[in-house]
Amino acid sequence: MTSFKSVSYSASRPGPRLIVLGAVHGNEFCGTLAIGQIMAMFDAGELVLDAGHVTFVPVTNPLAYAKKTRAGDRNLNRGLQRTDAPREFEDDVANWLCPLLASHDVLLDLHSFQGEGEPFVFIGPENNQGEIEPFRHADVEEALALRLGVDRCVSGWLSTYAAGVEHRRRTANLAQASDASTDVRYGIGTTEYMRSVGGWGVTLECGQHNDPLAVDVGRTAVLNSLTHLGLVSGARPQPTPHMQTLELCEVVDRRDAGDAFARGWRSFESLQRGEVIAIRADGSRVLAPFDGFIVFPSATAEVGTEWFYLAKPSDRLTRLDPSGPASMS
């Protein structure tokens, strides 16, 4: 039986409760390494917790980490919820992780990606009382995203995923899709779960898997989070002055194994309306419906699952007060 490990530091003065995750996916090492460096700074007295509480989980999915693969039995960052009947290793992780997340206020989840590209941060929805992802802490989440040290921000994940599920349910290829791909709850990962239990948080994609600079990005983000939230002393980080903000707005599924991209796409490449993105197995062309960006293109996507996302520019973060709130009210 694989054990789970978390390390916590608490101050005598009250303050926010922050949790930082690494290796939710086992082949994403930068978060683990960055967390290790921060913990060493606490242990050496180079960092001192002045208020609140911080918990570090260097390796969230130990089976996947040992295998050096994205998942152990399945993707931990999908369908995250507690279960009374665990069947896969990630179910056991979820039964341990979900209560741990719920006992904190703020989550910083450190990830990396396979292809080339620049670091970016995922944030949740604007404040709303809708059915998909009701939320009331958008202001503090946005303020933290602006202070992590990256200059690209993406929103709209769960609502776009839900729209894709609804479209998938209506297609003729429904029988080819897995049960998970037709369940809106399967789009719930760590940050979505955190919001569902009253907290808030962001996912930081620190860079390419094997890029040593990704560790630096992760370490800077943790330090900035600690000072921004007032957990450690030091100059509060300033907001990124030129943050590119994008909103996911559409997901396109792969319907046939013969569906192929028109060329090799990189995530966040710009698209012009009418540009050919891909060609279906029947010869029909998939065209860009608007000027925007392609996000998470996957040439190896399984039939009946998301093939790529489309995003539009957003002015969401440019509307904020530059001073921004520091912590949850």
Image (spheres, rainbow, N blue to C red):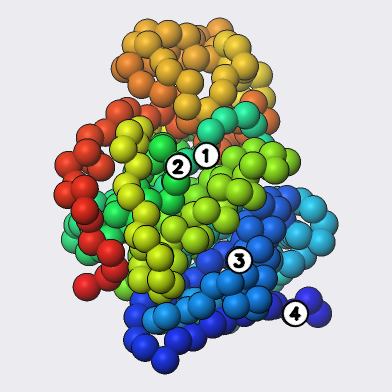
The amino acid marked with disc number 1 is Pro
Cα distance between the residues tagged 4 and 1: 31 Å
Up the image or down, 290 lies above or below 145; here it is: above
First of labels 2, 4 by sequence position: 4
Residue identified by numbered label 1: 119
Q: Secondary structure at mark 4?
A: loop
Q: CA distance from mark 2 to mark 4?
A: 33 Å
Q: Nearer the viewer, mark 3 or mark 1?
A: 3
Q: Gap between marks 2 and 3, in whole Å?
A: 19 Å
Three-letter code, disc 3? Ile
Q: Earlier in the sequence, mark 4 or mark 3?
A: 4
What whole-number distance in Å separates the C-alpha atoms at marks 4 and 3? Answer: 22 Å
Question: Of discs 4 and 1, which sits in the foreground?
Answer: 1
| Quadrant of the rendering where the C terminus is positioned | bottom left
Residue for badge 4: 3
Which mark is nearer the camera, 2 or 4?
A: 2
N-terminal label among 2 and 1: 1
The numbered mark at residue 285 is none
**In the figure, residue 84 lies in which quadrant?**
bottom right
Q: Position of residue 115 (x, y in %)?
A: 64, 31
Q: Nearer the viewer, mark 2 or mark 3?
A: 3
Q: Are marks 2 and 1 in contact (CB under 8 Å)?
A: yes
* Between discs 4 and 1, the one toward the N terminus: 4
Q: Which residue is mark 2?
A: 150
Name which of mark 3 and mark 1 comes first in the sequence. 3
The x and y percentages for residue 114 are 66, 37
**Depth check: 212 or 66 in front?**
212
Q: Secondary structure at mark 1?
A: loop
Select label 4 or label 3 by which is in front. Answer: 3
Residue at 77 percent of width and 65 percent of height: 63
Kind of residue at badge 4 = Ser
The CA span between labels 2 and 1 is 6 Å
